[in-house]
Image (tube, helix red, strand yellow):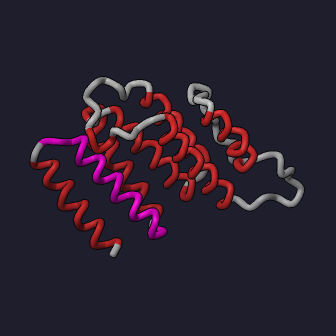
Amino acid sequence: MAEAAIHCYQQAAEAALEAGDLSSWANLRGQMSRIAADQGHLKRAADLADHALRRGGTRIHPAVRCWLHAVGAHHHAGLDGARNASAALDEAWRLLGHCDDGEIPPYIGYISPMEIGKWAGHTFVRLATKRPQRRNQSPRRGPGRLAKRSTPRLRRGHHRQRPHLPRQR
């Protein structure tokens, strides 16, 4: 079923490219990356999202790039840890301020601080479950604590003071 969905997204992405709509193509690649991640194929997921960002660059609408970075952070958290995930989340938060140009494509109209906060939360959870806690490490440190601290701030709209991922040791 997942491969059939990816195939349909791929066909739609090819049609978007033929129509010259690079933002739609990148968004569809991002949707494909989510399916791959849900199936446990994190490398494939990260490659799909990263390729969309590299190929489209700044020609992709900022809202789509913002979302791709947020989704990519989640993928990278499961692959190569906090450094790449943190960089991707930082870029998502930065781009969020440039999304509302009056031309947001309707398929990404849901982009908001809450959407980026959701992906930040998913990223924190993935990091927390990926890295086993050391025997002598305080439970007050690490991604779980960071996520716990960040959630109320996001609810209050303090997205400008974005949470940072802990350094990987």
Q: Name the residue rendered at 34%, 32% in the picture.
A: 62
Magenta segment's dominant SS is helix
On screen, 39 above or below 161? below
User: Does the image show residue 167?
Assistant: no
Q: Name the residue rendered at 15%, 48% in the picture.
A: 17
On screen, 161 above or below 89? above
**What residue range appears in magenta?**
20-40
Q: Nearer the viewer, residue 5 or 69?
A: 5
Query: Residue 80 at what x, y percent from top left?
Result: 56, 54
Query: Residue 40 at what x, y percent from top left?
Result: 48, 68
Query: Residue 104 at what x, y percent from top left?
Result: 29, 33
Q: Name the residue rendered at 68%, 55% in the picture.
A: 128
- Horizontally, residue 30 falls left or right of residue 114, namely left
- Horizontally, residue 50 falls left or right of residue 167, namely left
Q: Name the residue rendered at 28%, 25% in the picture.
A: 102
- Horizontally, residue 34 falls left or right of residue 11, namely right
User: Does the image show residue 140?
Assistant: yes
Q: Which residue of the protein is positioned furthest toward the bottom in this rendering?
A: 1
Q: Which of the 4 image quarters holds residue 161?
A: top right
On screen, 88 above or below 35? above
